Image (cartoon, helix red, strand yellow):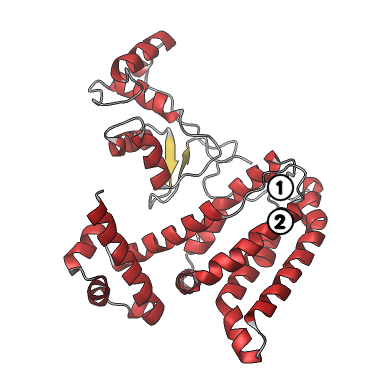
Amino acid sequence: MDEGKVDSRQRILDAARAEFSEKGFDGARVDDIARRADVNKALIYYYFKSKDDLLQDLLRQFLDERRSQRPVSGAPEESMGGLTDQGAEFDVEFLFQRRDILRIALMEDLKASRNGIPTGGTVLQHWLEALPEVQAGSAAQGRPFRLTPRVVAAMYFHHLMPALAFATLGETLAKATGIEHGVLREEFLKLVHETNAVQLHSVYAASASDPAPEAVLAGQRSAGSEPRPAAQKHLETSVSERDRLIAKHMPDGRLVDFPLKEKARLAVIEHISGMFESGTLYTEKQVDAILKGVADDHTKVRRYLVDYKFLDRKPDGSRYWTWEGLRA
């Protein structure tokens, strides 16, 4: 995508963010978004199928930015409470600076709850999808915990929801009480730290002996679920044959001409699938960034990775994972 297209697409997103913030999602009109972005309405529909699609893209951008910037522990001896405190401090600042889009996201989540949507809204889905990553990262640093109902409740109602509430309502409380916002922020973070210190042992460490089963989250498959289908007999290849096909079609480690024969195509796609790690969730942008490094037509490769079931994905294409899923 050239610079001009990126600029116009981002202008549309920025304009939509402003319109949604001022008028709410239902009150915002595509004509007004086009006028604010200084583009014609047809260009909006070129990039986005509908106003809802525009909102979802805006929310994904916001949530992916939070996930990519949120601090990750780098020291094994660091306590889980310390890591959670860092995350809370980051969230308070990050979410407050983006409280306009956060309010929109929360309103849409409330609608999803009111309408009985079983998967919840965008914020809830994003949070659920991130839990396996948080769990895996903590285990890698020597602080394993199980996603029992008690742990999930603590993470959602004692960590996420207070941060969301302070980001969206803290300023209002400051104005209503006359207490400086900075003072409220400092006291809020103290309470977060106190909660973390208690729950480090009473919730997270204690989950190891909790008999309750772990929650099954987005992208996870139970041990008894259907495995990735094996290749049909006529498409099976030996290791040497597979190596020969890969060398032929990817001589310099890059796929330029897509194989016409299915056996070669399957061998190449299986080889490329090795670039994705089991237990990791990827956005579509992350998948494309990986594939662009090895294929000219990366979108076709992405499609075949899904078709041949080396990758699975959410229906809206917002998240991808290896077929084996995200196991605890």
Q: Position of residue 1 (x, y in %)?
A: 26, 48
Residue 1: image tag: none
- The residue shown at (29%, 19%) is 249
Residue drawn 28% across the image and 65% down it: 50
Q: How many marks?
A: 2
Q: Earlier in the sequence, mark 1 or mark 2?
A: 1
- Place of residue 164 in the rendered image (x, y in percent of width and height, measured from the top left): 58, 70
Q: In terms of secondary structure, where does tag 2 sit? A: helix
Give the residue at x 47% y 69%. Answer: 105
Tell whether label 2 touches label 1 (CB within 8 Å): yes
* Position in image of residue 321 (x %, y %): 48, 41
Q: Nearer the viewer, residue 176 or 244?
A: 176
> Does residue 71 sit above or below 42 in this rendering?
above
Q: Amino acid at mark 1?
A: Arg
Residue lying at the far top in this picture: please name it.
Answer: 240
Seen from the viewer's position, the closer of residues 61 and 51 is 61
User: Which residue position is annotated with label 1?
Assistant: 146
Label 1 to label 2: alpha-carbon separation: 7 Å
Residue hosting label 2: 151
For residue 58, which quarter of the picture? bottom left
Which type of secondary structure does the marked residue at label 1 adopt?
loop
Instruction: Characterize the local packing of mark 1: few (<14), some (14-19) or many (20 or more) Cα atoms within 10 angstroms.
Output: many
